[in-house]
Image (cartoon, rainbow, N blue to C red):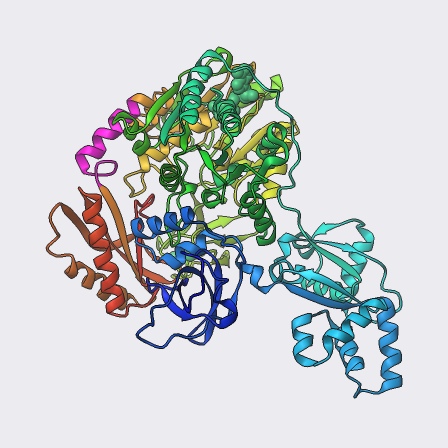
Amino acid sequence: MPEGSFRYCDVSLPVPLDRPFTYSLPETLRHRVKAGCRLIVPFGVRKLTGVALRCHDEIPAVEARDALRLVDAEPVLDGELLSLARWIAAYYCAPLGEVLRAMLPLVSDVRAGKVYSLTASGLDAARQLLLDAGPEDPVAEMLRMLEKRPLSAAYLAKKFPLADKALRSLERKGFVIAEQVHAERDPLRAPSERLRVELKHEPGERKLPKAERELIAFLLLHPGSHNLKEVESQVRNAGGAARSLARKRILKLAREPVAAVTAGPVRTRHTLNPAQQEAFAAIGAAIESRQFRTFLLHGVTGSGKTEIYLSAIEATMAAGRGSLMLVPEIALTPAVAGQFFARFGDRVAILHSAFSDTERSEQWRRIRSGAAGVVVGTRSGVFAPVRNLGLIVVDEEHDQSYKQEETPRYNGRDVAIVRAQAAGACVVLGSATPSLESRYNAQRGKYTLLELPERIEQRPMPKVELIDMREEFLETRKQATFSRRLVEGIGERLDNREQTMLLLNRRGFSSFVACRSCGERIQCRNCSVTLTFHRRDRRLLCHYCGYAERVPSVCPKCHSEHIYFLGIGSEKVEEELHREFPRARITRLDRDTVTGKRQYEVILQGFREGNFDILVGTQMIAKGHDIPNVTLVGVVSADVGLGLPDFRAAERTFQLLTQVAGRAGRGDLPGIVLVQTINPDHYAIRMAAAQDYQAFYEKELNFRRMMHYPPFTAMANLLVRSEKQEEALRLSAELGRLLTPAPEKIKVMGPAEAPVPRLKSEFRYQLLIKSASRKLLNVLLRRVRDFALDNKWPATALVIDVDPLTLM
Ligand code: ADP
Ligand code: ZN
Ligand code: ZN
């Protein structure tokens, strides 16, 4: 956009209507608005923050409303990121405004402002003033209101015409203090699990409500700072009491520090071994040539991929360009961040979804200013405004967390490649179990394949044994959770003071609760799935929507008392282990034991330091951890997930088993892996046991080719949902008709009930679309979206998922 003064601006807004809206620019904004700046504009009765796309003087057909405020003096999105946004909107068939919103971390800045509160001497002064001046005096009135709670400058200014001046004078006298507060950062608004509470001083003679007195009594007995959620579990109504006491300034409430970055165990810098060197040489040459190129780094578990990433980032830095490294959600731990700090110091910026908006915008600014030239982040980190981008690394590129499961449903890995192409940068996709798509792209020559077939220092790959649980049953006549072989293996580890990891990719205690008399399985009220029994909380929980209820004492259908529990989850594995090995020190890692980023790290750290003999967990334990003393990995059931109605079920099982097996024997001691299964002949399980990626790839690729699945077709899932079944059915039938007959080269399956036909109180039907041509698929999806818009479908009724990762 040329410099100058324009009267109108096209603004993209986060609304389903996928078109820019034209606003007129008031005099004061005319030459300040640039493309990529955020603007606050009226929209209906609301105010929305949008992104300026283009300023111009073309008089719009309908009268334009005035833009209200400019948020940024300089564009937050440069031309490169704006065109990336356009690509995402087109490819994923998502409204541009929603794409832009997903790209920007800074939304809540808008509400930032000053908040005033009363000091102790201010309190005395207030009382005095009230006596002296009487209730009519505005300053006295203001102080009286502040006595109840802190108030924002904006609010006070609205109530009292002279507030500004009066407040400044009160501040000078020390009667009030001002704090710069970001609305989002206001601790009183944060959920309890993200707050720490600490007593500031004893309340003295003040009269306080019972809950507040009890909380204070507890804090006096337990000095120091505590997580508020934990206190809530011990003191009744602690949450409300703490917030009220914080307003009275008796307590301190502060945000729980997220992922406090410690330097961690400073890793020694390794000299690359020959295999690493060869891989790095290819990447380094590409970085030097400053041309777009994509590498697939396929290295077995423990082959030293990280060291190659670090060298590549160094080379990029030496070339004067910036680097971006993406890691899966769960993998971005303080330990990982620490490695980067150790190597690159304060040139690193970490972008984590657990950070507050304020922390993120701070990092964002450092990146944009060029102060941070190395960025490590999870999925949305792909939008970081890295200057002069020269390299993007996507670690564990097969990981599902790169796919965003809400609009815009983009895959961070694929967006990374498109971004790099525009920037003339290099991409390194790394994995021990590359996705079929990426590996196939390497086969076709689109990507350059680099392989690390051996572990560092020729350490052996772990030996994997399959244990057929059907045979185990025939021999022992017992339905046991652990086979004799696994019990023996764990026992040996305990004797030798070595560590064990046990995987069961299903949380909870029992996965079904059923009635012996009538066969009823207790289901979620909102979803068509069974509720899982969680023993620690004594309740039944829905893993899809979070609905919970008490365990019934009689069957809700036939009132029989013969309720029984079926299916095993990680909580039960832990319990049975305690019974089998009473002296073992056991800990568990799953979504029930990990409610914040810190706990995840605390549990892992404890295990790494040898405070536990056995770590039980779901897939969380399979990701990337490097714990040298683990010599046994047990898989309680390899069959979980294999039977899901999803064409990627086999691939996912293969990846999970290979990854978890890779946790064994990473140190000086060799490792073994014991895999229990009732499907020992299934190719995914057999080939994972053989750790034969190549064989799996070829077999799976054949299956995909035969069945016309990706990577041989472009696929999209159209999900139609409504709380009214009749409406969901009708709309999906309308789509069905729209797509019949299917256009050439396109196959439409459905409409049919979704695999989970009811979820969060909505009925769901889906149409699966396979197309031999990406372009034709895109044309068809646009038609579908326009159809829904033209027919005024409710905004949430249609979900378009391009390149879906799961069909559930
Ligand atoms: P991967 O990510 O491929 O599973 P890592 O990068 O975690 O493997 O490396 C495995 C282990 O090998 C780490 O402990 C790492 O410090 C070590 N390592 C990496 N490269 C070398 C090397 N060239 N010489 C010695 N040890 C190395
Ligand atoms: Zn019953
Ligand atoms: Zn539910």
Q: Is residue 101 left or right of residue 187?
A: left
Q: Estimate the x, y position of residue 787 in percent, counting from the top left.
A: 22, 64
Res 680 quadrant in image: top left
Residue positioned 86% across, 78% down in the render: 127
Residue positioned 74% across, 66% down in the render: 247
Residue positioned 28% across, 68% down in the render: 793
Q: Estimate the x, y position of residue 41 in percent, counting from the top left.
A: 46, 69
Say whether residue 487 is visible. Answer: no
Where is 395 relative to 534, above or below? above
Label tally:
0
Res 17 quadrant in image: bottom left
Residue 579 covered by magenta stretch: no
Where is 587 relative to 300, above or below? below
Q: Is residue 244 left or right of residue 61?
A: right
Q: Estimate the x, y position of residue 633 in percent, counting from the top left.
A: 49, 25
Say whether residue 401 is visible. Answer: yes
Q: Is residue 775 left or right of residue 493?
A: left
Magenta region, main secondary structure: helix
Task: Give the residues drawn in magenta, as a range.
Answer: 695-713
Where is 688 relative to 705, above or below? above
Q: Estimate the x, y position of residue 279 in percent, counting from the top left.
A: 42, 19
